[in-house]
Amino acid sequence: MGAVNPSGRAAASGVARLQFSAWAGMFVFGIVMAILGAILPSLFERIGFGAGAAGNLFLTMNFAMLVSTLFFGPVVDRFGFKAVLAFSALLVAAAFLVLSRASTYGLVLGAAVVLGLGGGALNGGTNALTSDLHEGEKRGAALNVLGIFFGFGALFVPFLIGAMRAVLGFAQILVLATFLSLVPFVVYVVLRFPGAKHAQGFPIKEAAGIARNPLLWLTGFILFFESANEFTVGGWISTHLEKTFGTGAGAAALVLAGYWAAVMAGRLVSSRLVRRVRNETLILASAVLALAAALLMALAPSGAAAAAGAVLIGVGFAAIYPTTLAIVGANFAAFSGTAFSIVIAMGLVGGMLAPWLAGRIAEASSLRQGFIIPVVDCAMIIVLTILVRLKTGHKIAEVSQP
């Protein structure tokens, strides 16, 4: 579907407004992904639970996010984007408000569930909407730009807490996050969205057919390994630098910031490159670069070399996730919501399992050994991308035949 007119395509001004609404929603999702880690020290002080209970918060939020990711797509394909996105933003705002007032662990846990449910649908919905608003090479460019707004949101709360906590206080910062989450809610309520693709009834048999398409699973596993990479490097690189090389906490934090900044910068560059090169080619080149950087991190003789690898791998990771979604959107346009549900859910599973596995390896051996995971994952992405390229190339050849 492209952007909306009476039969489903929108005028340029309508596309711009809807794209802005997707950016706003993705910015809020970035806040969702960063918020628990940023506020944990304050929650420890206020409520007094331990590290094990904190780990359960992350697991609970991620599981809720997985559940909502699986359901948002069929709902969007049947009923349209408007209600799903508006309700998701409202859930996120409610969770932030509860966190700002929570005085018991039970309330924090409940807020984590609501945060995951709202955040998962907001992530999937904004990606699917962006895919539907654009066609051809513009789709990959738009999805890469959308990913930049995730980075802005993820950096916003830690920056605000570091810079303004003494002035605003913990609760007031969360209230501010609540109001920021209400911005996309209001936008979604006001804007006119494309009609549902299957408003007369969801064709379950046809939708089930895409779940049997090998291309969907190939792209889904690319997202599985890519999310595994992003969560593993983002979650463990600071600890790796401190424990393995004796890097100071401040310097390690700067390297982590540099990693995320590299991801954002890489997506900005990729939004231009994807207009000139084939999606599969960009993913393959990115994965090769990421593999070289992963080897550098795993084998680094010094903290400086590992830090360089972390920044370089951020550039390598940048294009893989959004450009893979562009392939999904182009090949499953009639059921983009359902297709995005499946592949994004697969990505979430990888993002949940890989950091846990890295921790187990670190406990049994060392974090250096744990960083073999990104090496293996990058190699798998290369293999899968070659298979996707063969699959999509074959499809193009079939279409071009008389």
Image (cartoon, rainbow, N blue to C red):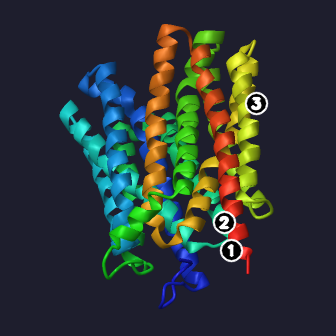
**At x 31% / y 45%, what residue is drawn?**
64
Query: Dot 1 corresponds to which residue?
Result: 399
Q: Name the mark on residue 258.
A: none
Categorize mark 2 by other alpha carbons within 10 Å: few (<14), some (14-19), many (20+): few
**At x 54% / y 84%, what residue is drawn?**
10
- Residue 265 screen position, x and y as percent: 71, 47
Q: Secondary structure at mark 1?
A: helix
* Rendered image quadrant of residue 391: bottom right
Q: Nearer the viewer, residue 108 or 300?
A: 300
- Residue 348 screen position, x and y as percent: 45, 43
Amino acid, disc 3? Ala
Query: Dot 2 corresponds to which residue?
Result: 395
Q: Residue furthest toward the front?
A: 402
Left or right of 125 in this view: 325: right
Which mark is first along the chain, 3 or 1?
Answer: 3
Q: Is residue 368 above or below residue 195?
A: above
- Residue 20 screen position, x and y as percent: 54, 68
Query: Dot 3 corresponds to which residue?
Result: 292
Q: Is residue 331 above or below residue 221?
A: below
Q: CA distance from mark 3 to mark 2?
A: 31 Å
**At x 33% / y 57%, what residue is drawn?**
71
Categorize mark 3 by other alpha carbons within 10 Å: few (<14), some (14-19), many (20+): some
